[in-house]
Amino acid sequence: MSGKFFDRGCNPVFFGEGIMTERRRRKEWNGIERPDGALIRWAAGEGERPLLLVPGFGGDGDCWGTAFPRQLFAREIAPVVYDPRGLGGSTMGSSQPSIALFAEDAAAVAEAAGAPLAVLGWSMGASVAAEFALARPELVSGVVLCCGSADHRRIAGERPALFRPILDRSAPLGEPAAALTEALLPASGKWSPTFRRAFRETLEASFAAHAEGIREQQTALAECPSLEGRLASFAMPVLVVEGSEDRLIPPGEGEILAGGIPGALLSILSGGHGLVYEAPGELAGAVAEFLGR
């Protein structure tokens, strides 16, 4: 999702002072050229405890809003953000899309930012972060898996009405944008009709502007490899965060993830799939406590 939505200040409860406040607390955007020609845009905030943020489906480096990064900064955690290939200021490259490829991009950003560091992946980004941590454990000091699943394809098969419009490459891009809007709406109904409409319209515009990147992510997510047989292989501390009212990834999936990872911690927060918007302080607090162990 583009940062333009947050610039509009549609909801001060969720997004506070505007994304530009957070941009001033970051270094300038940098670029990493990948072997297949892709250029990955990234930026790092200043601080002693860097945290690489891996966005979910359709999200770019500004998808985190204002409140969550601000809450991280308040806890002396410096977000490292990036635009996945084909989104924001990053280009596509020639490789076939896959979660493993996206994990390699995340690893490249981590190396550029000064690995080893901690990594937080949200939704599809949790799968990317997990693949990164399993493939390159020497670069990862800890992992936070937020609103993720041990097996996305299993969940998609169990919830076809929710996932079909997100994964269908033949459908107009307005359909996955609308489906994601519904999935991210707080079950508590905090978002006004005006805010819901603005959110959906911004997603639609962002998806249309980055159509190739979105289609590539649809392909990668549809073929997302299961983690269920590999959970015992994590070699670093892991925190699993679950939303108690998640409309996309059903409650209980976090317990499956945490239960299979030796020593993993599980934090269940009140909210849905968009915890970074609904509960930024609580999420940042859980992350800070985990990183401080």
Image: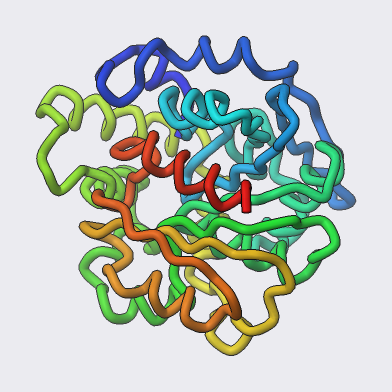
Q: Nearer the viewer, residue 87 or 183?
A: 183
Which residue shows up at 53% across the image and 24% down it? 74
Q: Confirm whether residue 169 shows in the render.
A: no
Q: Position of residue 252 (x, y in %)?
A: 31, 74
Specify whether 25 is left or right of 109.
Answer: left
Specify whether 33 is left or right of 43.
Answer: right
Q: Nearer the viewer, residue 262 or 55?
A: 262
Spot the residue most to the right: 35
Spot the residue most to the bottom: 229
Q: Position of residue 149 (x, y in %)?
A: 44, 70
In this rendering, the answer to whether 151 lies above or below 74 is: below
Q: Quadrant of the C terminus?
A: bottom right
Q: Nearer the viewer, residue 265 or 153?
A: 265
Which residue shows up at 72% across the image and 32% down it? 42
Spot the residue most to the front: 293
Q: Position of residue 117 (x, y in %)?
A: 75, 47
In this rendering, the answer to whether 162 lies above or below 271 is: below
Query: How many discs appear?
Result: 0
Q: Position of residue 134 (x, y in %)?
A: 72, 71
Specify whether 193 is left or right of 38.
Answer: left
Q: Describe the colour scheme in one phrase.
A: rainbow
Q: Quadrant of the N terminus?
A: top left
Q: Confirm whether residue 118 shows in the render.
A: yes
In this rendering, the answer to whether 279 lies above or below 251 is: above
Which residue shows up at 21% across the image and 48% down it? 182
Which residue shows up at 12% across the image and 44% down it? 188
